[in-house]
Image (cartoon, helix red, strand yellow):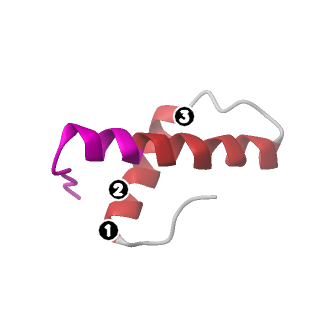
Amino acid sequence: MATTYESVGDLAEALRRAAAAHGKHEERTGQEDSDWPDWYALYMVREHAGEELPT
């Protein structure tokens, strides 16, 4: 699925939201996620599409 952002600022905000959500994900799992880029990407694509977000 293609995902685009209107501006650098919009992309940066999406990254910040993904980072915050990922921090909570790591707290829940109790471990560091070495595959965080994949998790961020999934989160950002789903968020942009209005789909269920990963936890």
Q: Which mark is residue 49?
A: 1
Asked if residue 26 lies left or right of residue 6, the reply is: right
Q: Which residues are magenta?
A: 1-14
- Counting from the top left corner in percent of width and height, residue 25 is at 69, 48
**Residue 12 inside the magenta-drawn segment:** yes
Do the residues bearing badges 1 and 2 touch, measured as CB atoms within 8 Å?
Answer: yes
Asked if residue 14 lies left or right of residue 5, the reply is right
Q: Which residue is mark 2?
A: 45
The quarter of the displayed image where residue 47 is located: bottom left
Tag 2: amino acid: Val
Q: Secondary structure at mark 2?
A: helix
| 51 relative to 55, above or below | below
**Residue name at image x 42 percent, y 72 percent:** 51
Residue with the mark numbered 3: 36
Which element carries disc 3, helix, strand or loop? helix
Picture quarter with the N terminus: bottom left
Point out which mark residue 12 bears.
none
Residue at image location 16% in from the left, 51% down from the top: 6
